[in-house]
Image (cartoon, rainbow, N blue to C red):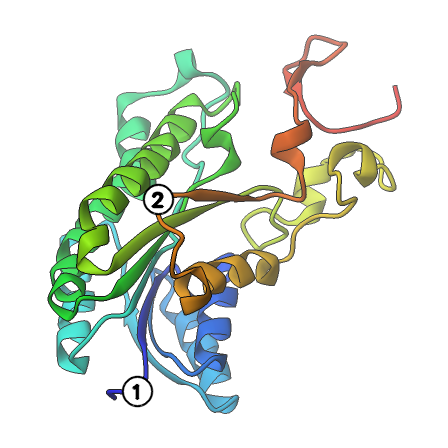
Amino acid sequence: MADRRVSVVTGGALGIGGAISRRLAAAGDLVVLNDIDAEAAARTAAAITADGGEVRTVAGDVVEDATVTEIAESVRALGRIDVLVNNVGDFRPAAKSFQDSTPEQWQRLYELNLLHVFKLTHALLPTMIEQGSGSVVNNSTVEAFRGIPQHPVYSAFNAGVSAFTRSLAVAVGRHGVRVNAIAPDLANTEQTPVAWMRRGYDEGLEHTWVPLARFGEPDDYAAVVAFLASDDARFVTGHTIPVDGGTLAASGWFVRADDQGWTNRPHRA
C-alpha cells in the first residue's frame, strides 16, 4: 500500500465521476468509489477490476453524515488518503425562475453542491495534513463565473466551491496539501446528454456555440482532474480550471426573440 495512492471519488460511478474513477484506477490508484446509485457503482467497480485496477465502493448519498463516516472509515482502514475528488453536484431541483424557487430547493442545492464538500474534506483533510501530502480536487462549474438566469442558487453555491478552494489552498499549502477545482461546461453525460443540451436547436452549429466546436466527453474533464491530482501539478494550488471548450471565454446569455426565456444556444432564426 505504501507505493499506491488512495483516491476517493464521490459520485464516482457515471459521467465525469465515472471517468475520473476509471482514469485514476488505470494510473494505479486504489479508488474508493462513492455513489448514491449502488448498481452503477458496482458496474463501474467491476469494469475497473476487469481492467486490472483496484477499487472499493461506498454506496450512499454523500450529503448524509452516515455516508461521510463510511467513506472516512474506509480511508482509515487503508491507512492513507492521497487524492480527494469532491465530484458530486447538480443543478436540480430546478425552478423556472428564482422567484418560483423554494427554500426547500435551496437547501437541497446547498447540500448537493457545497455542504458535502465541507463535510468530506473536513473528515479526510487531517490525514493528509498528518501525512504532509495530499491533493483535493473539487467540481465547480463555469456558471460560478458567469450569470445563469434560471439557476442563480446553483451558481451561487458553486461560486462558494471555488471560493472554498482558494481559501483552503492558502491555509493548508504549508502542510503539503494542494486544493484545486475544475469548472466544467457542456458535458455529454447521463445527467446532461447532448440531445438534452440541444433540445431542438440545429446540429452542425456547435462551432458558433463552443469554440472547440464539440461537446465535452467525460474523459475530457477526468484528464484535467488527473493532472491536478498528479505531481505534474505540484506547484498549482488554489485555482479553478475551466474545462469548457472555450465557452466561458466566448459565452453570453440572450433573451429569446420570442421572449420565451433565455438562450445561449445557436439556432437558425
Residue 92: % across, % down? 43, 37
263 and 211: which one is in front? 211
Query: Is 69 left or right of 267, judged from the image as shown?
Result: left
214 w.r.t. 29: above or below: above
Amino acid residing under circle 2 = Gly
234 and 9: which one is in front? 234
Q: Residue at x 80, y 40 (%)?
A: 206
Query: Is 183 left or right of 134, judged from the image as shown?
Result: right
161 and 62: which one is in front? 161
Question: To which quarter of the image does residue 107 belong?
Answer: top left
Check disc 2 and report its element: helix, strand or loop. Answer: loop
Crowding around mark 1 (Cα neighbors within 10 Å: few <14, some 14 to 19, many 20+) is few
46 and 27: which one is in front? 27
Gap in Å between the C-alphas at discs 2 and 1? 27 Å
- Identify the mark at residue 241; answer none if there is no mark: none
Residue 146: % across, % down? 52, 24
- Image quarter where the C terminus lies is top right
Q: Residue at x 45, y 36 (%)?
A: 91
Q: Can residue 207 be seen in this snapshot?
A: yes
Q: Residue at x 19, y 44 (%)?
A: 171
Amino acid residing under circle 1 = Asp
Q: Residue at x 40, y 11 (%)?
A: 99
77 w.r.t. 103: above or below: below
Residue 106: % across, % down? 30, 27
Check disc 1 and report its element: helix, strand or loop. Answer: loop
Question: To which quarter of the image does residue 231 belong?
Answer: bottom left
89 w.r.t. 1: above or below: above
Residue corresponding to mark 1 = 3
Residue 152: % across, % down? 43, 22
Residue corresponding to mark 2 = 238
N-term-proximal mark, 2 vs 1: 1
